[in-house]
Image (cartoon, coloured by chain):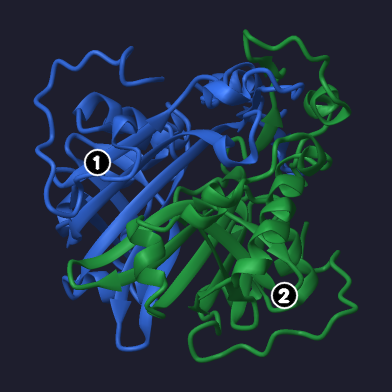
Chain colours: A blue, B green
Amino acid sequence: MSTTTTSSSSPALPPSDRTRIRRVAENACYDRDTLYAIVDAAYVCHVAFADDKGTHCIPTACWREGDHLYIHGSNGGRLIKLLGKGVQACVTITHIDGLVLARSAFNHSMNYRSAMVYGRFEAVAEEGKAPALDAFMHHIAPGREHHARPGNAKELAATTVMRISLNEAACKVRSGGPNDDEEDMHLSVWAGVLPLVQQHGAPVPDVHNPQPAPDYVQQWSTAHSAP
Amino acid sequence: MSTTTTSSSSPALPPSDRTRIRRVAENACYDRDTLYAIVDAAYVCHVAFADDKGTHCIPTACWREGDHLYIHGSNGGRLIKLLGKGVQACVTITHIDGLVLARSAFNHSMNYRSAMVYGRFEAVAEEGKAPALDAFMHHIAPGREHHARPGNAKELAATTVMRISLNEAACKVRSGGPNDDEEDMHLSVWAGVLPLVQQHGAPVPDVHNPQPAPDYVQQWSTAHSAP
């Protein structure tokens, strides 16, 4: 995925003072299609926030619905308790696509797709929890929301679902080969890209599992989430 | 990798008020071998810190030497400038190993290896930069530090290398199959793990590349960094 191959039919995200990218600005993108694709390819995001003990960075599962990124957790967890107070958060998602080996050490780089989101989380109302968690199941494995036993009243009561708007966000995407300095092009050094791909391994059934594997399990290792 | 299979010959990390894990505490580990393995398997970490614009979470390349995690960047970058002021930081590394499908939606989980490090970065002295960046090259591809043109005086002067002690850190590791409630075991729902593996793709040589691929390139796609 690159900025030049992504067509955006949705309005661009106006960069804020926090999301305007200054370093290697040619890799910045502010269009929603790129942002949505980066979020949708993720199972986990990193949430940064501060409390009286300092700044924290916590990985947690995520999914997207419309123009919001969702997370969930136990009511009693630190992340949920703090975010519930409305503290400012920064959510970052990063996919690494390859190591870029240039002729000079200085021009080594990585290919990646990353998204940063600024804002405050809000709790999803009681009646919205079950549909949101169904959407999470669907993100994990489309169809799973119809197979797994849904949360009962007690489980739903113990769970908080939170969401953050994707309106203050920016993406940074690098793809392609090394960019060497002209004066290094004669050097006898191999240059190119060592790709990294998030691959799907063969499903591992639970030992107490008499059920045949549903389609989304059977198709798991033939699909993968790489670009 | 799991807490039970990791033998630690090095002293444990005493949990601090910030690193003591309270949620799903049975997945916590405080031994250095686990921490080092999680850091060494990473190409990128997420660094959280705060400034007058709020809390930020920035992905950046990382490597380890001894008991420190290293990063580098352009002197003028926001990350380097802020961290150089000695602000408190939290560095998090997360590897996702699989999606854990339980019989109930509530007991779905992920297999992962994560590390959180708290502290303050310090700049590496001028004379330490070149060896540290060699170690970074070695982490990217062992042997690369002998092939790529090393940084010249101008490039080294434009680059800041920073490190943070791994002394205040904690890891969290989950592996294995789903943990269903006893009363759900009769349900006709497939349960198991959908593995995710960071795989190495076939190297992509630069078009202007007359050199034969060195060993670390030729061996790239037969090796991978998954556990």
Q: Is residue A157 above or below residue A104?
A: below
Q: Is residue A39 above or below residue B19?
A: above
Measured in 3D between alpha carbons, the distance from the residue under mark 2 to the one under mark 1, in whole angstroms, is 34 Å
Q: Which residue is mark 1?
A: A170
Q: Position of residue B224 (x, y in %)?
A: 77, 35
Mark yes or no: residue A52 visible: yes
Q: Position of residue B207 (x, y in %)?
A: 62, 8
Residue B67: numbered disc: 2
Name the foreground residue: B193 vs B215. Answer: B215
Q: Residues within 10 Å of mark 1 (few under 14, many from 20)?
A: many
Drawn side of residue B37 relative to residue A72, left or right: right
Name which residue type carries label 2.
Asp
Q: Residue B144 is drawn in which quadrant?
A: top right
Q: Is residue A176 above or below residue B136?
A: above
Chain holding disc 2: B
Name the foreground residue: A211 vs B100. Answer: B100
Q: Position of residue A90 (x, y in %)?
A: 28, 59
Q: Residues within 10 Å of mark 2 (few under 14, many from 20)?
A: some
Q: Residue A36 is drawn in which quadrant?
A: top left
Name the foreground residue: B140 vs A199. Answer: B140
